[in-house]
Amino acid sequence: MSVTTHSRFESIGVHLPRRAQSTDELLQQCATPVPLEDLTGIRSRRVCGDDEDSVSLAVAAARDCLSRSRHRAEDLDIVIFTSISRVHSDAPRMSFEPSMAGLVKRAIGARRAIHLDVSNACAGFMSGVQIVDRMIKSGVVRTGLVVSGEKITPIAATAAHEVTDARDPQVASLTVGDSGAAVVIDRSDDEADRIHHIELVTSAAFSTLCYGMPSDRWAGMAMYADNRAMHARDRIQLWPRFQMDVLAKEGATFESEHYDFVVQHQVGALAMHLFCRVGAAMFRAPMPESLSVVEEFGNTATTSHVLVLHQALHQGRVQGKKVLLVPAASGIVVGFVSATLSSVRVA
Amino acid sequence: MGVVIQASATTTGTETGALAHAVSAARRCLERAGVAGEEVGLLLYVGLYRDDNIVEPAIAALVQRELGMCLDYAKGGRPGFSFDILNGACGVLNAVQIAQAYLASGQVSRALVVSADAHPSGHDHDGFPYAASGAALLLGLDERVPGFGRLYVLDEDDGDDRSAFDVEGFLSFGEAGTSGRKHITVRRDQAAAARAVALLSTALTRAVSAEGLALDDVVVVTTRWSPGFSAALAAACGVSVERVWSATGWTKDPVSSALTIAYDDAVRSGRLSAKVPVLFAAVGSGLTTACVLLRP
C-alpha cells in the first residue's frame, strides 16, 4: 500500500435552522441591558425550533455534505460527532449515551463505519478532523465524516435570565447560534487540494477558566467564562507562538506559507480583530484577509470555521486558495489548520 | 513495531467524584510506568458520567492539568493535546485505535487513556446503575511485538427507531429543575443483557476469525454489562469461563473503565500469560460492540 502523506476536505455541508433571532430580540429577554452588538458585532443568530436537536442538525448537515461527495454513506470508514451540545430530544435534555455518532451513522446509512463522539469544547470539530487526518495517514481509514449539530442557544436563554452586567461570566453565552456542519475527508494526491497542516495543543493550566454546565438557578445549560483571563495577551499569543514553532521545525515561516485568507474562531468581531493583530505582530508578517460570518450567525461553537468556509465557497472566494483556520477553545486549546480546497463544491 | 500497554491502573475506591477517580487512576498508572505527566503527549478521556454534568472544557483538559502535562505551552516544555471520547463502554477501544494513529505519526511517543464515571453529585444513588470507578492505560510503541491490531465494530441492527433505546443516560431539565448539576437519569432495559451477550459473542467470534485465530487461542477481556456477564459470554462462545475475564467483585457496572479494570485484574492476578493474545471485547449502549486483538 502506498503511503498517504496528506488528507483533504473532499466535501462540506451545513445546515442552518430557519429561524433568525436578532440581537435586539434576544436582549429584550435580558433583565440587564448589555451592549452586545457593540462588543461583538453580532446582529443575529439562528435558533432551533422545538422539533430540531443536535442529532437532526448533524444529520441534515451530513446529508448536505454527502449529496456533493464522491463517496456514499456506506463507503465511510468512520463517523465522528463533535458538538458541545448533546440534545437528542424535543425536551430540554443533555445526553451522555448512546453516542450521537451512532445515531447519525444509522440515520445516514453509514453501515460499515466506526463511530464515536469527540468532545473538546469549540475545538471539537477540528479535533475530529485531526483524528481522521492521522488515521488516513496511518492507513487505518480511507474516508471519514466529521459532523456536528450544535443546539447551543439554550445557554443564551439561561444567560438572558441571569446576566447582571456586561462583565458577567455568562455574557459570552449571549453570542451563540445554532447550526450543523459536516465534512468528508479522504486522501489527497494533489498539492493544490489538501490539508497542509492540522496541529492542536492544549495548555491545561487554563482549563478552569471556562465551564459549560447546568445552571444552579435556572433549569437549563449555562456557560461561565472568565473572558478577561481567556483573552489576556499571553493566552492570545499561544496560537502564533505554537504555529511559529511548528513551521520553524519545517524551515518555514508564516510569510513563506502564503496564506490567502484567515478564519478565526467566530467569537466576535472585535476579539477576532485583536487575534489577527496580535498574530501579525508576533509573526512579523501581514495577516491575510479575515473571513467572517459572526455578524449574521453569531458564535456557532464547533461549527464556526466550516460555516465560514461554506459561505466563502458559495461566494466563489476560496476555491483553489490557501486558507488558514485558527481554532480557539476552552482547555485552552489553540492550533492551526491550513488547507487548499480545490475539489469542494457547494450548493 | 506495535502499540502496547506500558502500564495500567485502577483507583483505590476511596475517591469521591469522577474527576478524582480519573486523576487517581492516571497518577497510579504513570507511577507504575515511571513516567512523568509532562512526558505524555496525548491524553484521551473516555468517561461518560462526570461531576456536575460538566460538558466544557473536555474533562481530559482538567485531568491533564492535575497531571502537570503541558500546563502552558508559552512557558516551554513539551506540547500536549487532549480530548474526550464518548461511546459507552466501547470508548476505551476507540481511544486505543486513535492512539495507534497518533503514535504511528511520530507526533507523540506516549498516550494515556483515562476513564472514570460517577453520579454527577459525587454520591451513589440507588437508581444509578454504574459504579463510581476510574482506570488508566498508558500506551506506547514497542518495536519487538505486533501489539494492538485493527478495530472491529459490529452494531445491532434494530431499525431506525430512535424512541426506544436499550440504554440511555441523560440529564432531563424537566425532572432536575435547578438541580441539573446533581441529577442524571440512566435507563437500562434488563432484557437487553441477553442481546448484549449474543451480539458480542458474534462480534468477537468474527474478530478472532478475521485475525486468523480460533477462540481457544485467545484470552478474552470484556466489559461487565451485568453480574455473570463473562460466564454468559463464555457459554455463548462455547469456551471455558477461564478464557473470558471481566471486572469481578463489583455490584455495579464500572462502564467506561470496565475493560481496563478487567485487564488490570487479569495482569495482577497472573491470569494473562505473556505468550497468549488478548482479545479486548466491549459491548455498550447502541447496542454497539468493539473488539481489538493485542498480540504479544
Image (tube, coloured by chain):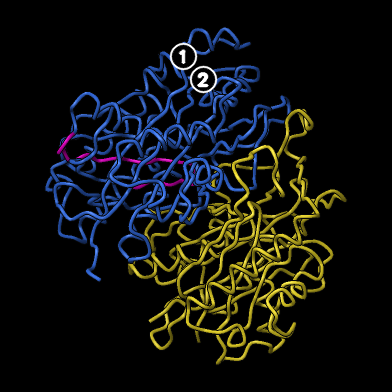
Chain colours: A blue, B yellow
**Of A68 and B96, the residue lying toward us:** A68
Q: Quadrant of the N terminus of chain A?
A: bottom left
Write the start and end of the magenta stretch as one range.
A319-336
Helix, strand or loop at label 1? It is strand
- Element marked by disc 2: loop
Residue located beneath label 2 in the image = A47
Give the crowd class for mark 1: few <14, some 14-19, many >=20 residues within 10 Å.
some
Vertical placement of residue B233 versus B133, above or below: below
- Horizontal side of A194 relative to A129 (left or right) equals left
Q: Residue at x 57, y 22 (%)?
A: A156
Please tell me which residue is depicted at 88% across the width and 51% down the height of the picture: B126
Residue A306 falls inside the magenta stretch: no
Tag 1 and tag 2, C-beta contact below 8 Å? yes
Q: Residues within 10 Å of mark 2 (few under 14, many from 20)?
A: many
What secondary structure characterizes most of the magenta part? strand
Q: Amino acid at mark 1?
A: Ala
Visible residue check, residue A43:
yes
Count of labels shown? 2
Q: In the rendered structure, does residue A327 fall within the stretch colored magenta?
A: yes
Instruction: Give the image location of residue A66, x and y in percent.
Output: 36, 39
For disc 1, the marked residue is A20
Estimate the spatial distance between the alpha carbons at disc 1 and disc 2, rounded to whole Å.
Answer: 6 Å
Give coordinates of residue B51: x percent, y percent. 70, 47
Q: Residue at x 46, y 33 (%)?
A: A301
Q: Amino acid at mark 2?
A: Val
